[in-house]
Image (spheres, grey):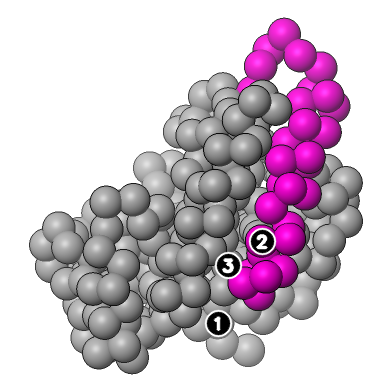
Amino acid sequence: MAFELSVNLEYMFHEAGDRLEDRIAAAAQAGFAKVEMFTTAGRDVPSLARALADNGAEMLTMLVDPRTRLIDPETHAGFRDLFHQAALDAAALGCRRLVVGSGPGAPYMKRAVQLRIVADAVAGVVPIAKEHDLTIILEAVNTRVDHPGVLFSQTVDAVDVINHVGSPRVRLLYDMYHSIAEGEDVEQMLMQYGRLIEHVQIADVPGRGEPGSGSVDWPAMLELLRNAGYSGAIGIECSPTRTSTADALAYIRTLS
């Protein structure tokens, strides 16, 4: 089984310029029909929609502002507003998945308490997701290298919230780079939580370069995904070590 690849435009195809519209065109020219981005803040959504249509590309995931500290109930109303706007923009771009993170944690609060408060925030936007036919995908990110202080530092943190909310609209974004960087066992994570995975993202470790630039055994990792029953696209979210993104991604394309 071959995996289709998607590319995160925030990290890749910088050689095409600063505009995501130009990066969409460059990605499509390189043979990538699926793309991902962060938030639409400061972006021209109609212009992005035209670029997607003109290049036959699909926006696979978008991000709801990850800086909101969801362990604080006072932020939940603002988070619902952010999510609602992201949902409207996602509809305009034909995107069906919105990524949600936890924001920073608090060392003075019990972890279980913090996770329940975040679950309340996520449950509060499920009706918006239903209205716009969206899937909310929760992402854990590593604290050892990239995101010190974040609450969702382990895959189990996101899973805990998914299980607590108990909605089919809330699923898991399993980022293999963050999982490995945090010291998790990929095979164990896939065996335990594979049924909850809506999307997978990858980059190599160390360095977060393209697959093949670090020490990860990618043929083995892709086989683990297949064995876990995952058949969706794989999002590449890396900082290429080569000037040409297409050249940097040549290795993973031979494997997928």
> What residue is drawn where x is 49% and y is 58%?
86
**Point 58% across, 67% down: residue:** 97
Q: Is residue 60 left or right of residue 131?
A: left
Cα distance between the residues tagged 3 and 2: 12 Å
Residue 6 located left or right of residue 16: right
Report whether 39 appears left or right of 76.
Answer: left
Query: Given this view, does label 3 or label 2 mark the residue nearer the observer?
Result: 2
Q: Earlier in the sequence, mark 1 or mark 2?
A: 1
Q: Horizontal and vertical percent for residue 87?
A: 53, 63
Task: Establish if 186 lies above or below 96.
Answer: above
User: Looking at the picture, how far across and down is residue 144, in whole percent?
Assistant: 53, 28
Is 124 magenta? The answer is yes
Label 1 packing within 10 angstroms: few (<14), some (14-19), many (20+): some
Residue 69, x across and y down, in percent: 58, 29
Q: Residue at x 68, y 12 (%)?
A: 107
Q: Which residues are magenta?
A: 105-134
Using the image, tell me which numbered label, if any, was put on residue 117.
none
Q: x, y (%) of residue 162? A: 80, 51
Q: Which residue is mark 3?
A: 97
Which residue was labeled with disc 2? Answer: 128
Q: Name the residue type under label 2.
A: Ile
Most frequent secondary structure within the magenta stretch: helix
Disc number for residue 3: 1
Q: Amino acid at mark 3?
A: Arg
In front of the other: 123 or 198: 123
| CA separation in Å, label 3 and label 1 | 18 Å
